[in-house]
Image (cartoon, grey):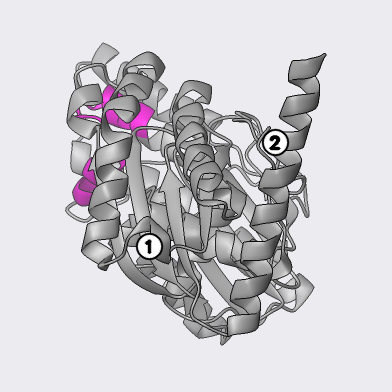
Amino acid sequence: MGDIVMNKTYTSRYEKRVQEAYQAHKESGAPTYILGIETSCDETSASVVRDGREVLSNVIASQADIHKRFGGVVPEVASRRHVENITLTIEEALADAGKTLADIQAIAVTYGPGLVGALLVGVAAAKAVSLARGIPLIGVHHIAGHIYANRLVEEMDFPLIALVVSGGHTELVWMKGHGQFEILGETRDDAAGEAYDKVARALNLPYPGGPHIDRLAHEGVANVPLPRSWLEPGSYDFSFSGLKSAVLNTLHNAAQRGESIEPVNLAASFQNSVTEVLVEKTLRAVREYGAKQVLLAGGVAANRGLRDRLQERCKAEGVPLVIPPFSLCTDNAAMIAAAGYIKYEKGQFAKLDLNGVPGLSLTEQ
């Protein structure tokens, strides 16, 4: 019983320190430096961002070469590598920014969705720093981070539509203001990034497959008939499992007939099918909801075919489009710090019982 009382007392003291530090900083009017931490999958990243907009450092320790031989991310291997990298990554991010922990006003960390073991490494590190320094701890949704990567490029103009396309997520998100997320549509099966990886595997391309498919697509002609999955009339949901199966069946049937299909043409046809559905549903949502701006977010935002097609269609529709640079498309901590800044301004802080939540919903975070 004594331990429980002591823990509650200690927690209360911590929360009081956090509020005092927050109020003192707000009253000072000084710049806000947030340390971001991202460990949701296979990148260990730490970043220092000033006032939610200026990236002072963004260190990423990638595990791509480690997981490449397995053809995908191995959760246990990823978690162990995060443990090895997290402290060094934070130290490097602070050094690159010319800051120390004494200069940091808050810690923003991804707490979901993602691989639970990987998430826990980042969350534990963030809680340790928050507790030691007595500064706010901010839990950030991974997809919110991808969306706010755009704010590191250009200010958001609400209301807006965000198209989030990554390895595990494909979503259309409606935002009326900062931190307000409404999901208009999401993937029902394979996300776009997953479909890219599976098609790449069928073409004997290395993991991750997206960049290789994109490269081949620009060398080929989209002359292989493949389906477009529009789903029910008016639906903003996505489904790419059928398209993936159609590609596999096309390759299998051609092999049975003793025919060959040019990989570059198949890649171009597959990419054309994916990007057409993504772009047209996005523009339909823009018209229906009256969006002032479109944001492209997520790892697949680095896909040149998608970027070019969306730019072309947004220009034709007269709606501004914001796309992060390639360095901010993949998982990184700068985007987490940028999203965390919005919560910092609102005083929305996590407690020391913050945990990793693998299936965290964007609308409930």
In the depicted view, which residue is nearer to us: 287 or 337?
A: 337
Residue range corresponding to the magenta coloring:
197-216
Work out whether residue 208 can be spotted.
Answer: no
Earlier along the polypeptide chain: callout 2 or callout 1? 2
Q: Is residue 241 toward the left or the right of residue 264 in the image?
A: right
Residue placed at 79% from the left, 17% from the top? 2
Q: Is residue 282 above or below residue 36?
A: below
**Residue 252 at x, y percent in the picture:** 33, 17
Q: Residue 345's mark?
A: none
Which amino acid type is shown beneath numbered disc 1?
Val
- Which element carries disc 1, helix, strand or loop? strand
Q: Residue 118 lies in what quarter of the image?
A: top left
Q: Which residue is mark 1?
A: 48
Q: Which residue is mark 2?
A: 10
**Residue 112 at x, y percent in the picture:** 59, 37
Q: Is residue 19 toward the left or the right of residue 75 in the image?
A: right
Residue placed at 27% from the left, 20% from the top? 71
